[in-house]
Image (spheres, coloured by chain):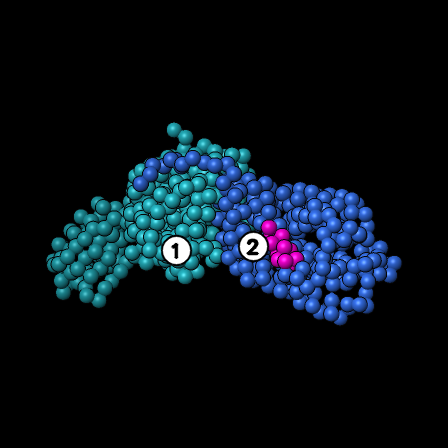
Chain colours: A cyan, B blue
């Protein structure tokens, strides 16, 4: 099957600044894909190359098999982009903005789908409101709706939840998950790594314009072999032998220990038994994507 | 929900039509500012100049100064407003970032160019008609060759629409566009024979006026009303048409390479 996104040896330079260096990746159709990296890593540049907003210095990019330069009409029809910045056209109402956007993609009489998108994003009550009069969260919803008016096969969300409230975040993810279940490929960039961990089946991490990790979310989490143990102990306190493992110490007698491996849990327990320390509460925790992210970024 | 890749029937010209219609709406929704205000400005010019110079100047034989002034003022309004439409729309869209709404869709560079150009020409022509409609009540205005006048209005508004696209694409800030408007467009239109015939100028200024393309637009447009012009109308039409096509090709090329639009 044709991949939804195929990027091959893409580089982009602005003068001496290398925004992207030889990035290659492929996103199969129907995947929920995460694109992570610190600010300035090149995530938005890569998205903009796919969208035709930025022209790559070298390499090629395809959306649903269509080259973004030579077959730009088909490529752009296959792609819906929710931009990072909160942009809007102050001359129009929500419905006008969506109808106009739909028309740009060659669609007439698209009212049924526009109504459905507005319904899912809770915009129906604001359909006739001028864009200027909307709150930031509502404007963000309209941006999502504008990216979806032409029912693109591939949806790119560039930090869609930056600065939005919990209600919108939940409504947005419910809607986007539904679209993904229906077969739409979703590419997400976010700084909220718990969102990426919960939603994305595969993740690419960029740093200074280079791909530093590209794997399934599960494999990335397994790369970090360590774990954490949270302990709440009796009045005896933590044995001195375990002190070097402490990464956090709470006033109420709770400790967070960092272990290199799950096997070390038994050694910790043995030392607590030997010191006759009462364990009141204990929890073994896996590292999350944030820790994997920090580890990968610090290693490159 | 609707499955992926299930877009409805696509209409090839719909993208172009929508962009043109959006640009039309953009100025029509604020027509007090974009249509009525320039008509009022033209009326002010007519009032001040015709009252101060009436009876003292006869530019063409048998044509009083007020009548002479009206086609020039109408054409000046057409040109300035055509330029203002495409330049301000593009520059504002770039500044606010909403330019991406027209860069993300599958519009070709030709569709992009034509939509902005036609909307600019439309605003120019609407204002021009407004100026004529508002002024003919006060002065007798003959119309000798209306098709000539229309041709010059179309080419003139097209040239200024294309120049507006170039200025809008080039400008990143309001002051850059203002410089373009104040130091290029305004002198070219004011020194083009709107308020006088170049026959009344000293030889050097007459000679220099022939390098101003706006002069040919005004002179040719005026020919459509009085059947009288400073240079042969066919020569003016040739110069204006060649300028239009050359400028259009250059603007199309700028859009095609994504100059300051697709980085």
Q: Is mark 2 on a helix, strand or loop?
A: helix
Q: Do labels 2 and 1 share a chain?
A: no
The residue indicated by pointer 1 is A128
Residue B89 tag number: 2
Question: Which residue extends farthest bottom?
Answer: B52
Residue at 73 percent across and 54 percent down: it is B142
Q: Is residue A156 visible?
A: no
Whole-Å distance between the Cαs marked 2 and 1?
Answer: 23 Å
- The span picked out in magenta is B122-133
Badge 1: chain ID: A
Quadrant, the N terminus of chain A: top left
Q: Is residue B128 magenta?
A: yes
Q: Nearer the viewer, residue A46 or B118?
A: B118
Residue at 64 percent across and 55 percent down: it is B128
Q: Does residue A265 lie above or below B187 as drawn?
A: above
Badge 2: chain ID: B
Magenta part, dominant SS = helix
Q: Which of B112 and B62 is in front in this view?
A: B62
Q: Nearer the viewer, residue B202 or B57?
A: B57
Residue at 29 percent across and 47 percent down: it is A174
Q: Position of residue B85 (x, y in %)?
A: 59, 55
Q: What element carries label 1?
A: loop
């Amino acid at each position: 099957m044709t991949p939804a996104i195929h990027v091959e040896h893409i580089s982009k330079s602005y003068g001496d600044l290398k925004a992207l260096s030889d990035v290659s990746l492929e996103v199969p159709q129907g995947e929920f894909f995460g694109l992570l990296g610190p600010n300035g890593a090149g995530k938005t540049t890569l998205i903009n190359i796919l969208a035709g907003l930025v022209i790559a210095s070298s390499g090629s990019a395809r959306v649903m098999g269509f080259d973004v330069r030579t077959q730009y009409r088909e490529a752009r029809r296959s792609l819906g982009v929710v931009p990072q910045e909160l942009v809007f056209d102050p001359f129009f109402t929500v419905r006008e903005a969506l109808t106009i956007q739909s028309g740009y993609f060659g669609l007439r009489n698209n009212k049924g789908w526009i109504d459905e998108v507005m319904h899912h994003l809770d915009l129906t009550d604001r359909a006739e409101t001028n864009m200027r009069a909307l709150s930031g969260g509502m404007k963000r919803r309209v941006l999502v709706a504008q990216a979806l008016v032409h029912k693109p096969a591939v949806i790119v969300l560039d930090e869609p939840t930056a600065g939005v409230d919990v209600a919108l975040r939940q409504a947005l993810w419910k809607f986007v998950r539904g679209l993904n279940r229906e077969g739409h490929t979703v590419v997400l960039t976010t700084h909220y790594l718990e969102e990426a961990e919960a939603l994305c089946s595969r993740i690419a991490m960029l740093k200074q314009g280079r791909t530093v990790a590209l794997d399934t979310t599960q494999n990335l989490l397994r790369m970090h072999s360590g774990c954490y143990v949270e302990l709440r102990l009796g009045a005896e306190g933590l044995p001195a032998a375990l002190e070097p493992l402490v990464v956090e110490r709470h006033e109420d007698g709770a400790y967070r220990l960092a272990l290199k491996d799950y096997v070390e849990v038994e050694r910790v327990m043995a030392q607590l038994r030997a010191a006759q320390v009462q364990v009141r509460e204990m929890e073994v925790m896996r590292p999350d994507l944030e820790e994997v992210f920090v580890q990968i970024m610090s290693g490159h | 929900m609707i499955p992926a890749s299930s877009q409805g029937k696509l209409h090839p010209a719909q993208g172009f039509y929508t962009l043109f219609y959006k640009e039309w709406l953009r100025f029509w929704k604020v027509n007090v500012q974009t249509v009525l205000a320039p008509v009022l400005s033209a009326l002010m010019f007519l009032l001040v100049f015709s009252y101060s110079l009436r009876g003292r100047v006869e530019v063409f034989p048998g044509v009083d100064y007020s009548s002479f002034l009206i086609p020039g003022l109408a054409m000046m309004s057409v040109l300035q407003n055509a330029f203002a439409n495409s330049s301000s729309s593009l520059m504002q869209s770039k500044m606010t970032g909403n330019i991406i709404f027209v860069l993300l869709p599958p519009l070709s560079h030709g569709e992009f160019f034509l939509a902005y150009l036609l909307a600019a020409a439309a605003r120019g022509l609407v204002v021009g008609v407004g100026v004529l409609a508002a002024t003919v009540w006060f002065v007798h205005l003959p119309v000798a060759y209306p098709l000539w006048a229309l041709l010059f209005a179309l080419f003139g508004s097209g040239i200024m629409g294309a120049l507006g696209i170039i200025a809008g694409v080039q400008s990143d800030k309001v002051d850059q566009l203002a410089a373009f408007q104040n130091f290029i467009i305004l002198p070219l239109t004011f020194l083009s024979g709107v308020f006088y015939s170049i026959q009344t100028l000293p030889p050097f200024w007459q000679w220099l006026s022939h390098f101003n393309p706006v002069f040919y637009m005004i002179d040719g447009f005026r020919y459509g009303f009085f059947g009288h012009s400073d240079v042969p109308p066919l020569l003016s039409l040739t110069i204006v048409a060649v300028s239009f096509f050359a400028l259009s090709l250059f603007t199309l090329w700028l859009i095609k390479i994504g100059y300051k639009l697709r980085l």
